Amino acid sequence: MDRLKQDHSRAKKIGTILERLPEVVEILPIDTNIVIFRLPETILAADYVQQLETKGIRAIPFGKHLVRFVTHLDFTDEMLAEMEKRL
């Protein structure tokens, strides 16, 4: 259970990071280790995910304009800090 709480905490921190990005239109409520956010209609999720990949950040398209991050056992605080720097 404590491990899961860490994942949820990291997910909320990702949400805080995403709030600062001008291309993020909306962040869906973060109640677990899953973070889903909406991009404007001018940016396709698949294209955005490819752009993230070039920065070493992995995500998946979750619809035409939605992107999803999932925190898990292998996602560390160090990775979170690096993600914040790269965004």
Image: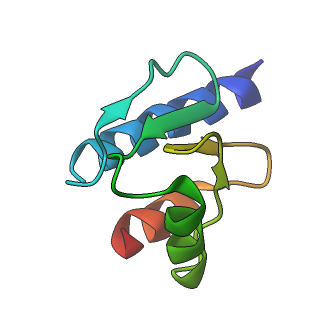
Left or right, residue 5 beside residue 66: right
What x and y, as percent, mark residue 83?
Answer: 47, 65
What x and y, as percent, mark residue 80?
Answer: 51, 58
- Camera-side residue: 24 or 6? 24
In the picture as drawn, the residue positioned furthest to the bottom comes out as: 54
- Which quadrant is home to the N terminus? top right
Left or right, residue 35 beside residue 81: right
Residue 1, relative to residue 87: is it above or below?
Answer: above
Residue 54, relative to residue 78: is it above or below?
Answer: below
Q: Quadrant of residue 69?
A: top right
The colour scheme is rainbow
Taking the image as drawn, is residue 78 in sight? no
Left or right, residue 72 beside residue 13: right
Residue 37, relative to residue 84: is it above or below?
Answer: above
Residue 53, relative to residue 20: is it above or below?
Answer: below
Q: Quadrant of residue 58?
A: bottom right
Who's the residue at 60% across and 43% down the image? Answer: 68
What x and y, as percent, mark residue 21?
Answer: 25, 54
Who's the residue at 53% across and 54% down the image? Answer: 45
- Camera-side residue: 87 or 42? 42
Who's the residue at 45% across and 32% down the image? Answer: 12
Who's the residue at 39% across and 38% down the image? Answer: 15
Taking the image as drawn, is residue 52 in sight? yes
- Which quadrant is home to the C terminus? bottom left
- Camera-side residue: 23 or 20? 23
Left or right, residue 36 beside residue 22: right
